[in-house]
Amino acid sequence: MTTFVYPGSFDPVTNGHLDIINRASKICDKLIVVVSVNITKSPVFTVEERIEMLKLAIGDRKNIEVTSFSGLLVDFMKKVNAKTIIKGLRAVSDFESEMQMALLNRNLDNDIDTLFMMTSIENSFLSSSAVRELAAFGGKIDDLVPECIADIIYKKLRK
Ligand code: PNS
């Protein structure tokens, strides 16, 4: 059975993340979406809120699990017995930091590989930080995040 792990901050989940979740879930038996700690970022939403939004956005899908982990991703991979990390790439600008993370993870555990998927072109300009900024100032986010979570985002951020 192939288990893929899709880690990220998901602060909040966007249509770009969902695009990767949909694509990745088609090529594995089980996809684990894991809200992880990125120490270079200060998240706006709590881990619980981010999980709730992911679950609402994904819906009831038998081969997708949503969870969280605080620690090294390679330790989580061992815990769930997975060898493949899924990452989305929007543009060449993502590549440098993603390559660094992939090689750092491989350095920690040579059995683990990172598989990169390109987001669809209509999501290539999208980021969680842009969604947060738009929501904070009352901008339109309906076409950037799943409809069912837009109100949660506005409620938290609108000034
Ligand atoms: O959505 P993000 O913030 O780009 O995701 C980055 C994330 C959370 C996947 C990355 O920071 C991570 O893997 N954090 C867990 C800690 C870890 O294993 N760090 C070493 C790899 S760089």
Image (cartoon, helix red, strand yellow):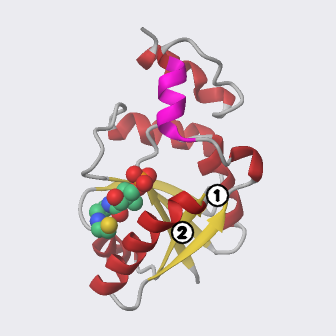
- The answer, for residue 123, to whether it is visible in the render is yes
The residue furthest top is 159
Which amino acid lies under the numbered mark 1 shown in the image of this protein?
Answer: Ile
Secondary structure of the residue carrying numbered label 2: strand
Q: Are marks 2 and 1 in contact (CB under 8 Å)?
A: yes
- The answer, for residue 59, to whether it is visible in the render is no
What's the residue at 52%, 59% (across, down)? 94
Secondary structure of the residue carrying numbered label 1: helix
Instruction: Tell me where the magenta segment starts and ends, as one range.
Output: 127-135
Q: Residues within 10 Å of mark 2 (few under 14, many from 20)?
A: many
Mark 1, residue position:
20
Nearer-the-camera pick, 102 or 33? 102
Q: Quadrant of ligand 1?
A: bottom left
Is the CB atom of the residue marked by disc 1 within 8 angstroms of ligand 1's nearest atom? no
Look at the image and tell me in which quarter the C terminus lies: top left
User: Where residue 131 sits: x, y (%)?
Assistant: 54, 30
Question: Magenta stretch containing residue 33, yes or no?
Answer: no
Look at the image and tell me in which quarter the N terminus lies: bottom right
Mark 2, residue position:
86
Dot placed on the residue nearer the N-terminal end, 2 or 1: 1
User: Where residue 105 sits: x, y (%)?
Assistant: 34, 77
> Is residue 115 shown left or right of residue 37?
right
What's the residue at 64%, 75% (across, down)? 28
Q: Main secondary structure of the magenta part?
A: helix
Q: Residues within 10 Å of mark 1 (few under 14, many from 20)?
A: many
Nearer-the-camera pick, 108 or 129? 129
* Quarter of the view holding residue 2: bottom right
Question: On residue 39, which mark appears?
Answer: none
What's the residue at 40%, 34% (across, down)? 49
Is the CB atom of the residue marked by disc 2 within 8 angstroms of ligand 1's nearest atom? no
User: Where residue 111 sits: x, y (%)?
Assistant: 40, 91
